[in-house]
Image (tube, rainbow, N blue to C red):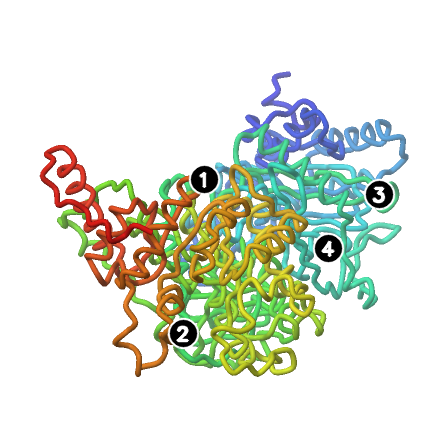
Amino acid sequence: MAREDKYVLWFDELKREDVALVGGKSSSLGEMTSIEGIPVPYGFATTAAGYQHFMEETGLVDKIAKELKDLTDVENSEQLHRIATKIREMIVSEEMPEDLANIIRESYNNLAEKVGETEPFVAVRSSATAEDLPDASFAGQQDTYLNVKGADIVVQKVKECYASLFTDRATYYRTKQGYDHMKVALSATVQMMVFSKASGVMFSINVSTGNDKVIDIEAAWGLGEYVVQGTVTPDNYLVNKDTLTIADITVNRKKVRLVRLPGGDCIEEAIPEDEAKAKVLTDEQIIELADYCKKLEQHYGCYMDTEFALDERTNKLWMLQARPETVWSRKIKKQPKPGSEEREKMATATTTRREVVVRGLPASPGRAAGKAHIIFDPKDIDQFKEGEILVTLMTTPDWVPAMKKARAIVTNAGGMTCHAAIVSRELGIPCIVGTEARSDNEATKAIKNGQIITIDATNGIVYDGIIEDLIKEKENEESTLGKVPEVFPTTATKIYMNLGDPDLADKYSSLPADGIGLMREEFIWTTFIHEHPLHLIEDGRSDMVVDQLAEGIRKVCQALAPRQVVLRLSDFKSSEYRDLIGGSKYEPVEPSALLGWRGASRYYDPKYLPAFKLELEAVKKVRNGLGFKNLQIMIPFCRTVDEAKKVTHIMKNAGLERGNDFKIWLMAEIPSNIILADQFNQFIDGYSIGSNDLTMLVLGCDRDNDTVQNIYDERNLAVRRSIRHLIDVAHRDGKTVSICGQAPSVYPDFCEFLVRSGVDSISVNPDAVKNTKRMVAQLEQRIILDSMTGRGKAESNELDW
């Protein structure tokens, strides 16, 4: 008998090309079984031919077609539910044809012999022939039955899987996608049951950010259905794909789990508090899983969406499913150039005062405002109106009709790979999940029904009212038609950009800058963290510091990649640190904070060293964990060579050592940096001239004092001589020199001085990037022309040191 005519095929008979025979789930299990080193529980699959045989022998083809004629509006939830329910009841009430039933029983008994058990427990999963295709991701529309035992019960569950082809959600989806209901078949996968101590999902790409340099794992106690359904907020682990090292671990409180019963079926049970807060997987298990995921991605040649389980009997990890990830794969195909409109949607304004209602996990980025509609049961989704914000406990596939109407979604439970998260990303709407785990407050309690709220799903925050600076109008694409694009000349002198607020990185990423010459870390503290680092350490929240810093830095590195980003480490003055929550306990009151305990002098001081190490951990997380090697760092306000030695030694011990792809810059803003440049050179790779402080200290006038503002001028000969000397000495030892003050964009003559002196790069504010780029190009052309003609103005020797 030909393969396509068989009613049952074993996993080792299947390949991923067999979707038409057994659906995406079953064919992928067959493919996985053939991959060396991937542990897959063995089993078999009923085929599309078996399903068609069942439908024809029972006369259901004509009966179902007749019912479907009455389905005139799938947006009418009551009509959809009534007709789909009737079709399912018709299928379940029919007897399975004897020949098909016997083959399923025989296959189950053969499976028992293969594994050496009399009546093994199995999982019976649905696999539709149109499910899990690369251009669709509404997997989970059909039913799954766990902990099934006995041949007759398996036959019954296969029939129930057939019926699940006509759930409300599956029927709705096929109609909207234009699929012919009668041409879609269903395969039932019968697979050895893993006695799951823990389980979860795993992606070969960070499904929240699109970073494909990491593997994204979510795990919870018990059977995996509660992770997929979003019933619990699972632990989250990020693993560097290249090195297979753990980049980040987030342990969440998992209150319940689904467990199997010894005699069959499953039950939910509460988890003891200690276990609920415990990490689910060991580091070794995390790495083992990541290795499987990496192999699967290499084998399939695309981003992968997988499921796994940890067997309580053997402590062995099993791979249960693997299918192509769809959302980011499609986005990358549609938008090969990162940083344009899709990332523009992710930018978040930060200047408006806001009242936070609740926080959660940012599952699908974006912003939206509207009326909250709280719904607890999917049977009530008929009440949900187009453009409202859906607030609920969690979502399952039954919620899809309402989700398609929603402007945004907020749920109490769930993780980055739960149903609500995946579908929201698919639909392109903002979504925040897991509010209970993140803020110890349920969205359904914190938000009032009918309340007008703003969703910032890039940062996982719900605000009261409409925050206008967060809700930006979409650009009219047609308005750009016919416009001549701006063209900027290439310059030998790199033009960098200064940046404070990470949320503006996307907005400015399209500017013709060669990277970020100065990213001010302080903005992350004042915008997102708000609390003194030592206060947070004492309060046991060190991880929060690392996570928040890393997230802010990540936003900029991702937006600008592969262009260089230079992060200036913290340079608050003591007075500014005191303004942070809890700061007064740790900060001295200094008569001149501008010249006091700041910059490098803090980093090696035992009183601040623990906080500085958290900054370094954040840098490591972004570079080594998330894979953004375009991140470099800069030491501010370093008074002595010994300070440079101490700080770089601390960095080295923390795992941040200078090398080919990691550079350490020094802010040149103190006269000692200039005078002793030949000695500073041995500890750093380049300088960035802080012309504001340098001018102040060279001329001895407070830049914040209006009385002496007439003296303060970066163009003063003493300042220019200092800069020229630094460039000469730095270049002598192969070090680069940049400048990050505002003077080059304000004074064309100062900019010309820098270019003629050989400065390697100029970093200006975003609004000055375009003009500075053009100005530098003209200057470079003039210098070349003067050199070729010999008619240029002779340079004065006034700059000689």
Please tell me whether mark 4 sits on a helix, a strand or a loop: strand
Q: Amino acid at mark 2?
A: Gly
- The residue lying toward the viewer, choosing from 384 and 52, is 384
* Residue 370 image label: 2
Mark-to-mark CA distance, 1 and 3: 57 Å
Mark-to-mark CA distance, 2 and 1: 59 Å
The earlier-in-sequence mark between 2 and 4 is 4
Left-right relation of 129 to 675? right
Q: Which residue is mark 3?
A: 315
Residues at circles 3 and 4 in contact by the CB criterion of under 8 Å: no
- Mark 3 or mark 2, which is nearer to you? 3
Q: Amino acid at mark 4?
A: Ala
* Residue 220 image label: 4
On screen, residue 203 above or below 404: above
The earlier-in-sequence mark between 3 and 4 is 4
The earlier-in-sequence mark between 3 and 2 is 3
Q: Which residue is mark 1?
A: 733
Residue at x 63%, y 31% (from the top left corner):
295
Residue 213 point in image, percent of width and height: 55, 42
Please tell me whether mark 1 sits on a helix, a strand or a loop: loop
Mark-to-mark CA distance, 3 and 4: 15 Å
Q: Residues within 10 Å of mark 1 (few under 14, many from 20)?
A: some
Residue at x 21%, y 61% (from the top left corner):
747
On screen, residue 147 above or below 552: above
